[in-house]
Image: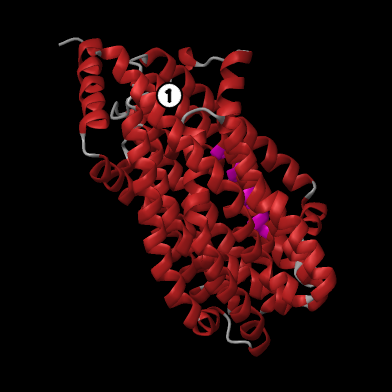
Amino acid sequence: MSEEEKRLSKSNAMYKKMTETPVPKLVITLGIPTTISMLVTSVYNLADTYFVSQEGNSASGAIGVVFGLMAVIQAFGFMYGQGSGVVASKALGAKNNDRADRSDSTGFALALITGAVIGILGLILIDPVMDLLGSTPTILPYARKYSIFILIAAPFMCASCVLNNILRFEGKAFFSMIGLCTGAGLNIFGDWLLIKVLGMGVSGAGIATAVSQTISFCLLLVPFLTGRSEGKLRIRSLTFTGSMILDICKTGLPSLVRQGLASLSTMLLNNCAKPFGDAAVAAMSIVNRVCFFTFATALGIGQGFQPVCSFNFGAKRFDRVRKAYIFTFITGEIFLGVVAVIGFFLSGNIIAGFRNDPEVIMIGTTALAAQFIGQLFQPLTVCSNMLFQSVGDSLKATFISICRNGLCFIPVLLISTSIFGLPGVQYSQAVSDMLTFMIAAPFGIMYVKKLKQMESAEKTKTE
């Protein structure tokens, strides 16, 4: 059997799997590895937060400050990854392997180049960047030490997001999980060794994160080098044409907006918390990490939904797209509902587990309890965002992305902080989640109805 025949056979097997496997089973099958991957990814920052918090409030605050920088790097990685992943998945659904190869190769190259540019500029302008991200004078020395290593690893961090997303959209989330889980395990071990044993403090956390991210990148690259991926990363497939780059960036724009605004909101949150001292910055840093960790499960299931959505949309199986959307929303709501109730009553204990400082615990407990309530409103928003991005409706997907950390969060944060002070900082994200839900719900409901109509029209054509 020739190489082309082998690839055709694999493509046909994948087509059958993605279009015939029962939707709940397929979403869960793809969602479990991505959920584990998301949980593991959040462990990077949780591990750094836990170990560095033992060094004091200023060191703990530095992790929150540099989180904004990492969000910028990941924002571009997710844009290229989600963009090339969706384009490639729809191409595979339409049985156009050449376009899938060109999309994957171009997205990967763009991520490496962008990561290198961010790393170089960040190292040159490191102090102004840290100040912009919300660093106080006492936090700056720690933030500088930590961010140096993050910036060095920026190309690998950015490109890892692309490899991860391409594998997910091909329905091969298991390979993605292996790479990310191994990196997270190394990160935790590295934190323990370099901080607790060798006493390297924040620098140790930076080195551990940079090394683990680089190793994770190498492992994610293995399926592409060994022929286990559907899409191929080839120099001859690089397509730096305006139409290809525009298609990738336009499709991935909601991810850039979502992650970019996450960075901006973190920066604003740190700056709004500044007047209340390093304890406030440290508390909100811990709250954000904990909430991302719990939300990662719902997000992981949603990312299991995306390849099902994009592939079946490309194959014109609109009934499966609709069923997958409804199933993912209900599953996410049930899970986050349970987590929110438990987390609400244990908020104080959770904060104390990271930083046993009375002021940090007091500020963090209130903020964490409020954000757990806000998480009840997130599943529908996330599912709607991922639905529109996966079918190529980037305008609606981008608008919903802008709402949570932009149109809703920024005005709520600035206005409530100026009126209520510290409570405004603590409650702003929860209020933003509620407002975003009210905006996103009509879009999701209307599109489900549209999918039903498209489904009927497709049946009429085939009869």
Question: For the stretch drawn in magenta, what is the main secondary structure?
Answer: helix
Q: How many marks?
A: 1
Q: Quadrant of the N terminus?
A: top left
Q: Quadrant of residue 147?
A: bottom right
Residue at the image position 42 percent from the left and 33 percent from the top: 166
Q: Residue 80 location, x and y as percent?
A: 55, 32
Residue 440 visible in rendering: yes
Judging depth in this view, the residue of 193 and 21 nearest the camera is 21
> Magenta residues?
66-78
Q: Is residue 281 left or right of residue 2?
A: right
Q: Residue 426 location, x and y as percent?
A: 68, 73
User: Looking at the picture, which amino acid does disc 1 mark?
Assistant: Ala
Residue at the image position 56 percent from the left and 65 percent from the top: 374
Q: Residue 347 location, x and y as percent?
A: 52, 80
Q: Quadrant of residue 21?
A: top left
Q: Quadrant of the C terminus?
A: top left
Q: Quadrant of residue 260?
A: top right
Judging depth in this view, the residue of 419 and 163 nearest the camera is 419
Judging depth in this view, the residue of 375 and 281 nearest the camera is 375
Q: Is residue 374 magenta?
A: no
Structure colour scheme: secondary structure
> How many residues crowd around disc 1 within 10 Å: few (fewer than 14), some, or many (20 or more)?
many
Task: Name the residue that disc number 1 marks.
Answer: 88
Q: Residue 27 location, x and y as percent?
A: 31, 44
Which element is circle 1 on?
helix
| 421 up-or-down from 397: above or below | below
Residue at the image position 37 percent from the left and 37 percent from the top: 322
Residue 135 visible in rendering: no
